[in-house]
Structure formats: structure tokens, C-alpha cells
Image (cartoon, grey):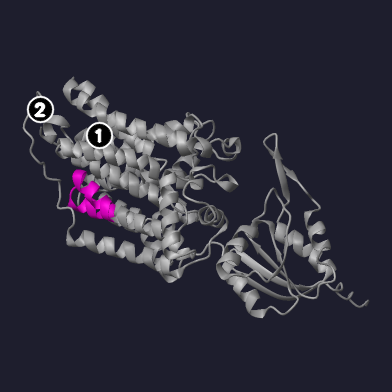
């Protein structure tokens, strides 16, 4: 059965009066991998590879994830993770394989994300070619290649880049089925969907959106035979998700604290800040104020693309947009947090629709007022400039490794290392990686001493208690990272207040997001002479 007959209008074809029986391939709207597409793919991967080779330090959440991966077996990774972390079991197993095969270093642990980013770069142009012309496909490829968040998570020990790759794969297979609904392709889609839920949590939204779109379309066309042919595929997906839920997901999602920690979507918005949050999650790729002002430009292009495709390629439009709609509905039900990284899986679809909007405006705008060209420049402005900034200054998060190496290069016999509360996971990782078992370590306590009645309990004496253990020491290295002000208290400045009373600063080293101080706590500083 042809794509026009089975799922018409995916490529702009007219709706046929009845279902036909022949099966013929329908060519995409544009050649998929032109020279321009390959150049953009190469440029996007080169930027990601540079960030990967820069090998920045693991930050707090990455270090906690690394501890789970390094110290658990494959079987134990199916159990509830430590530190309230949640990740798909398939992704965890891939990480474990990389750790066993390539070691405990950051490069080995981030290899899965890098390879997933390559998959996104390769698959997105194929999906875009099914619904866009050549110019718009190039724009969609460029937006993905230079998407700041996709570049960042390509070298992060988190599953979010993997979510995007899995979503792009499912969209690719879905459009392959729409082009030619053969038994082999339907079987491939069934297997791909069944495997996807083990590799990515948002994959269930992609499958629900695509599956629901196909089911509604078949029902609307009274194509009961085609709907019946889809049922085995839906059963395979559902059975696989149920097995994943019983084996891994149920234990991972049983932490009630997660529901109280993360924000969720409210529709209709109760006040403007909630609408602003929704726009930032889907369209605000960076946190810099100047970049967020361009989120409205991408939103406009996206809405224009939705309008254009909904009129001309209705089925293709709903295949792309429905997973995002399902994820937003799940957030309204308090089952899926509304945070940018959790919605990153939808980036290929959002960017394809934005590219469609830019091209549609370019086609209808007069030459005397090239609104489409202006929109094209504005849409590309932030991704290109931010990517150029990444090339000149590679991404850094919390450079704990740099300050630790600084202290190790200058340590003397008898030195003590004080590890701030939120620096301990990074320290544990690098202590194991560098085999630093001979250090004299004092671990700090935490200002947040617990959680009760949806509020944190605070220990205001935590620093005084910690530093009382260090009195009399001539050389104490104090390592801080992830020390942003919490609950109105800047804990590093709070610590310096006590340290200046009890000792003398001998050295200090600042790096991005991390600091190490060297203090002499054997005697308090001399009082200033009276005038």
C-alpha cells in the first residue's frame, strides 16, 4: 500500500478517495544527504568532539551518577539508584559497558553521550527531508548542529542526549513506515519501539504520540484493516514498557521527594511566570538574558511552521508534534517535570517545525520586505554565536579537578584536606581515579541537615563544628564546589567568616565553579595594631 493511500498527505499529497493496495516507495521532498548537509553535520560533530577532548571535570550530578555506574553490577543498576538519581536501565548498561571496556575516566563515561550526539546529527536531516524542502532542511540541520544544549549534553554524563537520539531514531522509522508500510518496516518499528523504552524515558511519549496519531488517523479514515495491522506493534511497545516499569522504572520513580522538588506544568497558567517558564523550557536554549530574548523569535518561527505544516502536511505535522503534546500532558498530571533537559528529546521536531516556519515566511514575503530572510538570521543568531563562543572557550561546569590538582601539586607532609559538603562526590570520584588513598581528609557536614514536611532542616552550627576539628593544623586545604547560595546563605562566604577569625590564609586558587583555600589554623591571625 502506498504512503499516499495508507497515510496520505505526509509529503503534501492529496487525500485519496479510498485505500489502495499497491506498495510503492515515495521519495522524500529533498535529497537527504547533500554536500551542505554533510558539511553541517561535520561542523556540528567537530564542535562536540572539541568539547569532549577538552575533558572538563565531572560536576556534582555527574559524579553521583559515576559512583552508581562504577560501584554497581549490571543487576544492581536495575535497582533504585543512590542519591535520588533516575536513569533508564539500557543507558546505564551502555555506560557500564564503556566503563568496563575503556576505564573509569571522564572520556569513557561520556562516550555514550558523544556517540548519541553523532546519531542525532545523522538522523535529523533524514527526518527533516521527509517534510521539508532543501533550504528548510539545511536550516533544520544547522539548528541541530549548533544547538547549545545539544552541544552541552553531548559531553555530559547524563542520559539527555541519548533521549534525543532515541527520539530521532523513532521519528526516522515512523516516517519510513509512512513512506512504505511494508511488513518488514512495521516489524522494525515494533522492535525499535520496544527497545527504545529501555534506553530513554521520554521514548514512551514519542511512541504514545506517534502511535496515537496513527490510530486516530486510521479511525478517522475508517481504515480498520490498517488499524488492526498496527495493533501488534502497539502491543509490543506496551508489553516492553510494562516490563521496564516492573523491573526498573517503578523502583526509580518511587521517591516522593522528587515530586516535591521539581516544577510541573499548569494549564491554564495561574500567572505569567508559568507561561514564561514553559517558553523557556522548550525554546530558551541558554540562560544568558540576551539569548533568552531570542526565544520569542524561535517561538514565532515554530508557530508559523506549525500553521504551515498543519495545513499542508497534516499527518507529518502530528507525527512530529504529538510527542511534545503528550509530554506536556504528563507534566500537567505531575508525572514529568517541566525542565529544559527533560524536554530536550523534542528538540529535533521543534527545530524542524521552526525551519518550516522560516521557509514558509520566506516564500510569502515580498522581495522589498524579506521577512523570511530576517527571521532566518535571527533564528540562527544565538546558536551560531554561542557555538563560536564554545569553540573559543570550551564549556566548563565545576572545575573541581583543576583546584584539586593545584592543591596536590603544592601539598606538604601533614597537610589536611577539608572537603565541603557538596564537593564530596567529586572528591570521591577523583580520589578513586587518581588513587589518592594517602590523603588526610576531613569531610564537611551540610547546612541542609534533612527534609521534613516539604521543607529543609538547617544546621546553623555545621561550619563551626567542622572547623573545630581542624584547630591546631598548620596547613589545611579547603576545597569548595557547587557552593552557590542555598536558602539565602552563601556557604563559602560563611565559611570564610569563621576561617578569618580562626586562622591565616596562605594560598587560594579559583577556577570555574570551584575554589581551594590553604589556611594556617594553628593560631588565629594577629590583631591589627591600635592607632
Gap between marks 2 and 1 measured at Cα: 18 Å
Give the extent of the magenta segment: 122-141
Left or right of 479 in this view: 174: left
User: Quick one: 92 or 32, which is closer to the camera?
Assistant: 92
Can you identify the residue that label 2 sits on?
Answer: 16
Q: Nearer the viewer, mark 2 or mark 1?
A: 2
Residue at 36% x, 43% y is: 346
Residue drawn at point x = 26 percent, y = 32 percent:
233
The residue under the point 39% across, 68% down is 50
Residue beneath disc 1: 310
- Quadrant in the picture for the N terminus: top left
Quadrant position of the C terminus in the picture: bottom right
Q: Position of residue 210 (x, y in %)?
A: 29, 34
- Asked whether disc 2 touches disc 1, contact meaning CB atoms under 8 Å apart, the reply is no
Q: Residue lying farthest left?
A: 22
44 to 342, vertically: above or below: below
x, y percent for residue 516: 67, 69
The image quarter containing residue 405 is bottom right
Asked if residue 498 lies left or right of residue 94, the reply is right
Outermost residue to the right: 530
How many numbered marks have been drawn onto this rendered protein structure?
2
Q: Is residue 362 visible?
A: no
Q: Specify few, some or many for label 1: CA neighbours under 10 Å numbering under 14, 14-19, or 20 or more.
A: some
Which residue is at a point 38% across and 40% down the rendered structure image?
A: 197
Magenta span main SS: helix
- Mark found first going from the N terminus, 2 or 1: 2
Instruction: Please provide percent x and percent y for residue 265.
Output: 49, 34
Amino acid at each position: 500500500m502506498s504512503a499516499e493511500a495508507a497515510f496520505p498527505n505526509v509529503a503534501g499529497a492529496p487525500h485519496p478517495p479510498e485505500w489502495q493496495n499497491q506498495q510503492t516507495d515515495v521519495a522524500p521532498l529533498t535529497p537527504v544527504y547533500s554536500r551542505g548537509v554533510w558539511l553541517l553535520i561535520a561542523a556540528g560533530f567537530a564542535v562536540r568532539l572539541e568539547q569532549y577532548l577538552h575533558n572538563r571535570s565531572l560536576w556534582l550530578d555527574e559524579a553521583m551518577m559515576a559512583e552508581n555506574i562504577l560501584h554497581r553490577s549490571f543487576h544492581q543498576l536495575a535497582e533504585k539508584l543512590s542519591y535520588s538519581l533516575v536513569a533508564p536501565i539500557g543507558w546505564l548498561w551502555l555506560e557500564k559497558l564503556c566503563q568496563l571496556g575503556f576505564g573509569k575516566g571522564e572520556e569513557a563515561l561520556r562516550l555514550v553521550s558523544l556517540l548519541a550526539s553523532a546519531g542525532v546529527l545523522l538522523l535529523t536531516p533524514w527526518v527533516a527531508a521527509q517534510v521539508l524542502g532543501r533550504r528548510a532542511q539545511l536550516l533544520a540541520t544547522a539548528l541541530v548542529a549548533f544547538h547549545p544544549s545539544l552541544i552541552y549534553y553531548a559531553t555530559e554524563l547524563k542520559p539527555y542526549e541519548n533521549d534525543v537520539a532515541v527520539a530521532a531514531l523513532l521519528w526516522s522509522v515512523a516516517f519510513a513506515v509512512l513512506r512504505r508500510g511494508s511488513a518488514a518496516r512495521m516489524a522494525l518499528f515494533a522492535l525499535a519501539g520496544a527497545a527504545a523504552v529501555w534506553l530513554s524515558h521520554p521514548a514512551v511519549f514519542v511512541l504514545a504520540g506517534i502511535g496515537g496519531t496513527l490510530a486516530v488517523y486510521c479511525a478517522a479514515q475508517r481504515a480498520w484493516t490498517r488499524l488492526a495491522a498496527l495493533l501488534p506493534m502497539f502491543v509490543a511497545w506496551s508489553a516492553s514498557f510494562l516490563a521496564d516499569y516492573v523491573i526498573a522504572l517503578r523502583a526509580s520513580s518511587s521517591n516522593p521527594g522528587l515530586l516535591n522538588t521539581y516544577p510541573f506544568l499548569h494549564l491554564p497558567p495561574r500567572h505569567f511566570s508559568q507561561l514564561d517558564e514553559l517558553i523557556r523550557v522548550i525554546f530558551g536554549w541558554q540562560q544568558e538574558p540576551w539569548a533568552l530574548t531570542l526565544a520569542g523569535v524561535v517561538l514565532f518561527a515554530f508557530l508559523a511552521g506549525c500553521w504551515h505544516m498543519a495545513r499542508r502536511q497534516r499527518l507529518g505535522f502530528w507525527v512530529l508534534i504529538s510527542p511534545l503534546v503528550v509530554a506536556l500532558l504528563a507534566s500537567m498530571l505531575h508525572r514529568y517535570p517541566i525542565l529544559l533537559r527533560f524536554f530536550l528529546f523534542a528538540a529535533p521536531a521543534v527545530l524542524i517545525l521552526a525551519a518550516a516556519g522560516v521557509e514558509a515566511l520566506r516564500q510569502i514575503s515580498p522581495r522589498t520586505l524579506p521577512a523570511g530572510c530576517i527571521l532566518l538570521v535571527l533564528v540562527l543568531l544565538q546558536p551560531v554565536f554561542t557555538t563560536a563562543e564554545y569553540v573559543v572557550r570550551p564549556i566548563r561546569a565545576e572545575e573541581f579537578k583543576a583546584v584539586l590538582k593545584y592543591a596536590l601539586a603544592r601539598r606538604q607532609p601533614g597537610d589536611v584536606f577539608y572537603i565541603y559538603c557538596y564537593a564530596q562526590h567529586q572528591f570521591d570520584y577523583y580520589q578513586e581515579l587518581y588513587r589518592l588513598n594517602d590523603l588526610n581528609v576531613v569531610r564537611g557536614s551540610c547546612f541542609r541537615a534533612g527534609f521534613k514536611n516539604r521543607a529543609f532542616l538547617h544546621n546553623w552550627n555545621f561550619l563551626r563544628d567542622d572547623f573545630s576539628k581542624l584547630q591546631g593544623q598548620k596547613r589545611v586545604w579547603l576545597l569548595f564546589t557547587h557552593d552557590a547560595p542555598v536558602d539565602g546563605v552563601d556557604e563559602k562566604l560563611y565559611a570564610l567568616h569563621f576561617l578569618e577569625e580562626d586562622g591565616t590564609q596562605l594560598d587560594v586558587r579559583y577556577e570555574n565553579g570551584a575554589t581551594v583555600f590553604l589556611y594556617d589554623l594553628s593560631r588565629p591571625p594577629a590583631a591589627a595594631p591600635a592607632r
